[in-house]
Amino acid sequence: MPSNTTIYTIPARTGDYVSLQAGQKLKLINPHGNQVIDFWAFVFAGGAPTNMPTSFIRSTATSPSTAPSPAAAATETATETATETATVTAAATAPAPAPAPFPFSTGVQYFSASRTRSILSKLVPSAVDQDVLYTNKSVPLFTLVEDTTTGIHDTLFGCCDRFRYRNLGVGDFEHPSCAENMHLALRKAAAAGLFPAGSISSEWTPDPLNVFMNVPVTTALDRPSGGGRIQCVRPESRAGEYIVLRAELDCVAVMSACPNDIISGVNAGHCTGVEYEVLS
């Protein structure tokens, strides 16, 4: 665990992780200005409240009114029997590998941009209001306690990934991305023993908090045509500005110095390194 006197650098286009205990504060610093930090956090076994269910399905959700019709039940039974027979036959010749969890192992929680927006009823959390960032199960995960910027951040844009760059015209799938940085940082965290390797599928990336990113809503809502257009424009953060997040749960935080050099507004067209510090 970094001490509260050390500032760590994340080089341009790369990522890092840090393990936090509830009550510790994480300071995210923009040393050069105009650089976006994609931010995630994950809560693994032992970090989340233990007095809550893991599934989104209620224990009383199954009832006779939702049971399949007799014909459907007969078809389902026949299908299951055939499947079980094939499974037994295959198992006799070769052991079946354990399926990898998707998108993550049971009990894992993560920072949810959409859940945070719905609970706060706003697009951007604010330090002025000491706003809370929530997990996908509506549990307080962080409190935004300090912000020296003008308060411009983003929760709407998904992080860049190799597929999005292909969509933007990059000719292959080899452009570095925030999604890749997140997964590589999690791989290092797992190797350090913070959680079992393979707990998070590399085919899934949750939406981040885009720290310092400037994504204004440029048009009003117009129901027939959708409206509410958004646009990435130059960040307003200046060199040395920062935010401070207080952890409300033990978690693993992940940060990426966004490598997007295709959309000019994201990092003002120039990717630089960022810094972070853990405060008591």
Image: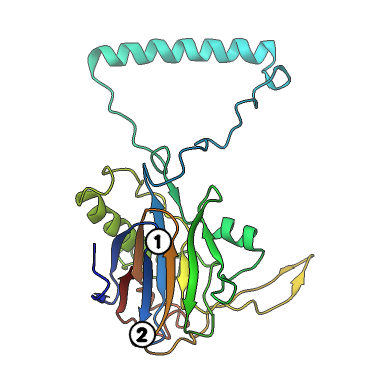
Look at the image and tell me whether residue 160 can be seen.
no
Quarter of the picture holding the N terminus:
bottom left
The percent position of residue 144, horizontal first and vertical second, equals 49, 70
Vertical side of 268 occupied by 74: above or below: above
Quarter of the picture holding the C terminus:
bottom left
Look at the image and tell me whether residue 256 can be seen.
yes
* Residue depicted at x 20% and y 52%: 192
* Residue depicted at x 75% and y 67%: 225
- Residue 268: give its label: none
Secondary-structure class at tag 1: loop
The percent position of residue 240, horizontal first and vertical second, equals 37, 87
Farthest residue, direction left:
192
Report if the CB atoms under discs 2 and 1 are less than 8 Å apart.
Answer: no
Three-letter residue code for mark 1: Gly
Q: Which residue is mark 1?
A: 23
Vertical side of 161 occupied by 35: above or below: below
Three-letter residue code for mark 2: His
Counting residues from the N terminus, which is met first, the one under dot 2 or under dot 1?
A: 1
* Residue depicted at x 38% and y 39%: 105
Q: On the image, which quarter does residue 189 sit in?
A: bottom left
Q: Depth check: give the residue in front, 177 or 43.
A: 43
Q: Which residue is mark 2?
A: 270
Q: Depth check: give the residue in front, 28 or 256.
A: 28
Nearest to the eye among marks 2 and 1: give it. 1
